[in-house]
Image: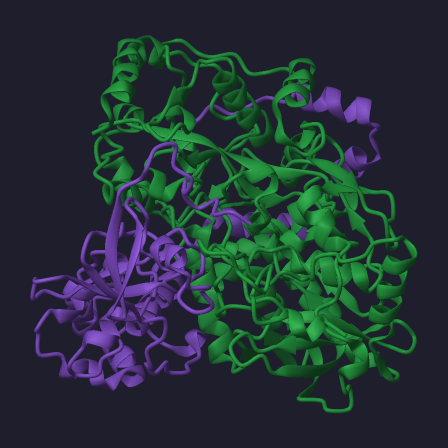
Amino acid sequence: MYPSEMQETISKLLEKREERLKVPFKRITLEEKAPLLNQYHPDYVAGSMREIRVGVDKGIRAPNELADLLEGHSRINPDKIDLSKITHDVDVLVIGGGGAGASAALMAQEQGVNVLLVTKLRLGDANTVGAQAGTQAADRAEDSPAIHYLDTMGGGGFYNIPELVEALTTDAPGAIKWLEELGVMWDKEPDGSMHELSGGGASRRRLHSARDYTGLEEMRVLRDEVRNRQITYLEFEPAVELILDDKGHAAGAVLMNLETKEIIIIKAKAVIMAVGGGGRLHYQGFPTTNHYGATGDGLVMAYRAGARLIYIDTMQYHPTGAAYPQQILGQLVSEKVRTLGAQLVNRDGERFIHHLETRDVVASAIIKECRHGRGITTPTGQPGVWLDSPMIEMVRGKGTILKEIPAMFRQFMRYGIDMSKEPILVYPTLHYQNGGILIDPSAATTVPGLFAAGEVEGGVHGRNRLIGNSTLDIFVFGRRAGVSAGQYAKQANPGKLTLEHVGKWEKELKDAGLKDRPISPMLLPNYTHHENPLGLGVGIVPELGEE
Amino acid sequence: MTNKEAVLEPKKAQEMIDVYIMGKRYKVTKGLTIMQALEYAGYQMIRGAGCRAGFCGACATVYQIKGSPQLKFELACQKEAEQDIYLTQIPFFPANKTLYNIDTMKPTAEDVLKAYPETVKCFGCNTCTKACPQEIEVMWYMSDALRGDISAAADKSFDCVMCGLCAARCPQGLMPYNVAMLCRRLRGKHVAPRSKHLEERLVEIKAGKYNTEIEKLKKMSKEEISKRYASRDIEPEK
C-alpha cells in the first residue's frame, strides 16, 4: 500500500490501462533519439565531466568522480615495497572474482598453466550476481549472430568496435553451451528449446534466463567449478597496483589484505584484469545497482600502468531502479519486468516511451517526465514513474510473476508491495560502465601481458550497452582472456620486476601541478555517518601511500 | 562521500531508533536497512556486504527483537532495522564443500550421498527452513535429494543465495546449500533436455555461415549501418 498522494496517481493508471493494453505505442526514431539524449541523459549534464590531465590518454574526458581517482596518488610507496619477497609466483594472475574473472581462470587453467585468482571481497561478490534478466545469444532459427551484431551496434550508437562486436555475437551461442555443460539451469521449454524473451533494443527474442536470478545462477555454477578444479583464489586481498617488468610488460600485482593490511607480492607471466566497474563512485549523486566493491579500481591500476582507455565518459543509467521504498532506493528492478510486458506510465496514467527501447533512451525519457512535473513524488522527495507490473499477468496469465521474476516479487513483498497487484515506482539508477580499458578481440590491452575482460574493458558496447550483453561479455571475453593469457604465459619470459611506473606516475602528477589528490584505487566506499578521520575509502590504508 | 544508499539528510527532524549491534546500543534514523544502520552507526564494512541487493548472500544476519525469545534470520541489505533490534552478522560459517567432477556424476540420490554422506543424518527438525532468509523449504529439498528427485531439489532451492544460515543452524552438521548447488548443476547438465536449435546454430557458426554477412556489416559506414538498423524488422514480443 502506497502513501495516499502516490495512491491517487494509481487510479489514473488503472483508468487508462485497458486502452494502453490495446493501442500499440510508436517506437522512437534515430532522429528523435539524439535530442532526447542530449537534453536528458546524465552523460550530457554540463560540468559533470572533465579532461584527464595526466597519463597515456591525457585529454580524454571522464566523470569528475572517476577523473579524481584516475589522477590519484598510489596507495603504496614503491620505494618501501620489496619486490623480491614474492608470495605467489604463477603463470596467470586473474584480478577479480566475478563472472569474467572466474571464466578467465577456468579457461586459463585449461591451457595447462598455473592460475591464481585474487579478489577484493569473496569469490562471486560481483555485479554478475545482480544481473537478473538474462544473457543474449542468437540461437533461434528466426535470429542470427548478424542480427545480434546489428542490434548491438545500434544500441551502442554505432560507436562499438566492430571486431569486438563480431567476437561477442559469434561466440555467444558457444558461451551458452559452455554454461549448459557446466550445469547452468537455463529456462527451457519442455522439449529442451530455450525459453527466450525480448529486451530493450533487441529485435529478436534472445535473452537466455534462469528466472530472474540469471547472473546468480551463472556465478554460483562458475564459483563451484573454480573450487572443484582447485584453482587457488585469495579473498579480501584486492590488487592495489600492477607490477611491470623492465620491458614494461605486466608481470604481477601488489595486493593488500583488507583485514590485516598485509602487503602481498604476486609475480605472474600474464595478468587478467577483471574487476568490473565503478557504480559505487555514485556519479552525479546517483544511487547504484552495483555491488559494494565497484569503485573503478581496474581503470585506475591499468591506466597508471600505461593501458589505453576508451569511452569512459559514458555510463549506463538503468532506467528502472527502485524509487520506493527508500530502503531499496536505486536497487535494480530487472528489465525483465518490461520484457514481460510491463509498461512505463507517468502521473497521468499515460505512456511516454515504448517500454522496450534501449536503456539510454528509456532512462532519458523517465528523467524528462519527472523534470516536467509528470512524475510521481515519494514522501522523501524522490521522483519516479510507475512501472505497471500487474499488466504482466493480465497478458501472460496468473502466476507469471512468481515463475519469471521471483527475486523482484520477493524484494517488494519484503516491504508489503505486491507487484502482481500494484505497480512499482522506478527512477534511473547508475548501473554500468559502458567503456573501459581498450582491448582487441583476443582481450589483450595495449600493455603487453595485460588482458582485460568484463565491465572493466571497453569498446564492445559503444556508448550504451544492451540488456543481456553484459553477462555475455563476461563469458565471451572472460573465456578469450583466459585462453589468450594462458597461451601468452607459456612463451613469456618476464624480466626484472619493477614498480617504476608508480614513481613516474607520481612525478607526472607533480609536474602537472596536481598535489594532494585522492588516494586510489578507492577499494571500498565509505558510508559511515560520522566523519572518517582517515579520509576516503578503507580508512586503514592511507598511511601506506604517505611518505 | 555522503550516503547515497538512503536519504540521510532529513528535511525535518527524523525519528531515531535504538539498535543493538552485537549487544551495544546505537541510535540510528528510522527506515534504514540493517546494513545501512550498521554503517550509520559507524561500521565500515569489510565482511558482511556484497551486492547490497539481496543476491550474493554475504550479509546473513541473525536478530532478535528485545523481549522476544525468537531468533530471526535475514539479509542485512534487505531487512529494515526496527526499534530494539539485537543483531549480529554471520558473514562466514564453516561448511564442507565436496570436490567433484560434474561430467561423470549421475543425477541420483546415490551420487549426491557419495558427495554429501551426512545428508542421511537429517532428523527432520526443519530448523534449516526457519533460518532461510529466502523462505526456501530447505528441509523439503533435502528430502527430495535423499529420495533421488534431483529436479525437485533443484527447483525448490533455486532462489538460494548461499548465505550459509541453513548450515549454521543445522544441529546435525549438514550443508544444505552445498547439496542444493550440486543438485542444480546435476539437473542443468544431466536432466534438462538439450536445446536442438542451439546445437544447430553452433554447427552453422563453425561452418562460417554468418561470416560474409557480418563482414559486410563491419565494413559499412555509420550512415549505411544506421539506415540498415532503422529498417530492421522487430519480432513481436511473446
Chain in purple (letter): B
Residue B208 in sight from this viewpoint: no
Q: Which residue appears at 53% of the width and 25% of the height?
A: A362
Q: Is residue A244 above or below residue B49?
A: below
Residue A12 in sight from this viewpoint: yes
Q: Is residue A246 left or right of residue A130?
A: right
Q: Nearer the viewer, residue B217 or A350?
A: A350
**Tag count:** 0
For this orientation, the residue located farthest to the bottom is A85
Q: Quadrant of residue A545?
A: bottom right
Give the colour in which the image draws chain A.
green
The chosen color scheme is: by chain
Q: Nearer the viewer, residue B17 or A323?
A: B17
Q: Nearer the viewer, residue B207 or B15?
A: B15
Measured as percent of width and height from the top left, residue A504 is found at 89, 67
Measured as percent of width and height from the top left, residue A245 is found at 86, 78
Measured as percent of width and height from the top left, residue A297 is found at 66, 60
Measured as percent of width and height from the top left, residue A173 is found at 57, 50
